[in-house]
């Protein structure tokens, strides 16, 4: 099964996204799909571009199911969105750095993604003025801090397994998915590649989701805090067939 057909076959697939140009685009599409799950966007509305007014309609009328089970499902979706967003950034970083100078790739391959991002402007041969923006550096740090929280081998997961968590709320997750698309776009610009449509659509959709993500996060904050792992109804990691 091809990567684009896998996306299309998902029950919550998003219509309107162009075919992925690389793995980063594919992972961004997955991140957006899980973000829509976290924000309780009806399947019928999962198309881009999204209408912010349509997304907000009905929220106050009780469209958001506020139960401990649904809050756990939203948390699972938020965690997956963050993971796929981080995968997207790392995939684009590694592809661009490797293809720029395959001989030097082993010298940087072992670096953490945040370190690779900071030296990317120099390694990609950009003009000296094209430094890694401090704001984007901070976003990259935030994204991979959350990713590391989810794959922490030390056994102290903290907020990663907390059913009500500001770090993995739909609102926070929306910001991280948008950040992933913005960082991927910046890297494409550094490499002087033609920008694809996926990053722009993911960023615009994340912007349109702002009111809904904030509202759903507010609903979820009303219930009792619950410590738990991944939802019993969701296998992780998800089965992904790519070619």
Image: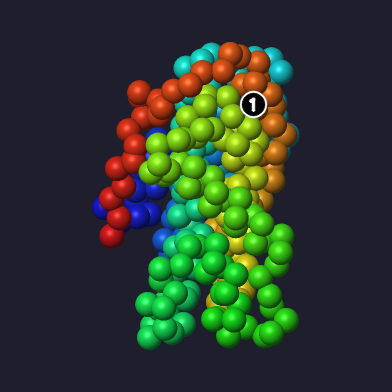
Question: Residue 54: percent from the left, percent from the top?
Answer: 68, 32
Would residue 88 be visible to someone looking at this image?
A: yes
- At a point 63% along the width and 32% down the height, the residue shown is 166
- At a point 54% along the width and 39% down the height, the residue shown is 35
Please rate how many residues cluster around mark 1, counting C-alpha atoms within 10 Å: few if below 14, some from 14 to 19, many from 20. Answer: many
Q: Name the residue under label 1.
A: 216
Depth check, front residue: 147 or 171: 147
In the figure, 54 relative to 70: above or below? Answer: below
Determine whether, in the image, residue 18 is placed left or right of residue 133.
left
- At a point 67% along the width and 85% down the height, the residue shown is 127
- The kind of secondary structure element at disc 1 is helix
Depth check, front residue: 151 or 205: 151
Would residue 197 be visible to someone looking at this image?
A: no
Question: Residue 136: percent from the left, percent from the top?
Answer: 67, 61
Q: How many marks?
A: 1
- At a point 66% along the width and 51% down the height, the residue shown is 204
In the figure, 100 relative to 239: above or below? Answer: below
């Amino acid at each position: 099964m091809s990567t684009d057909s896998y996306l299309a076959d998902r029950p919550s697939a998003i219509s309107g996204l162009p075919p992925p140009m690389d793995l980063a685009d594919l992972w961004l599409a997955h991140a957006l799909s899980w973000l829509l799950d976290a924000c309780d966007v009806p399947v019928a509305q999962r198309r881009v571009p999204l209408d912010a007014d349509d997304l907000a309609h009905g929220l106050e009328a009780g469209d958001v199911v506020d139960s401990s089970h649904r809050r756990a499902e939203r948390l699972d979706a938020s965690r997956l969105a963050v993971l796929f967003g981080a995968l997207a950034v790392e995939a684009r970083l590694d592809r661009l750095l490797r293809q720029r100078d395959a001989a030097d790739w082993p010298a940087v391959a072992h670096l953490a993604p945040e370190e690779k991002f900071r030296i990317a402007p120099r390694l990609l041969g950009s003009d000296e003025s094209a430094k890694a923006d401090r704001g984007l550096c901070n976003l990259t740090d935030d994204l991979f801090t959350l990713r590391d929280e989810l794959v922490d081998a030390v056994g102290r997961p903290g907020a990663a397994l907390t059913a009500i968590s500001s770090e993995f709320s739909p609102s926070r997750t929306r910001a991280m998915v948008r950040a992933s698309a913005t960082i991927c776009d910046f890297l494409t610009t550094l490499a002087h590649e033609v920008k694809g449509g996926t990053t722009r659509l993911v960023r615009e959709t994340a912007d349109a989701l702002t009111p809904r993500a904030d509202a759903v996060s507010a609903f979820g904050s009303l219930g009792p805090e619950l410590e738990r792992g991944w939802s019993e109804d969701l296998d992780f990691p998800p089965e992904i067939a790519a070619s």
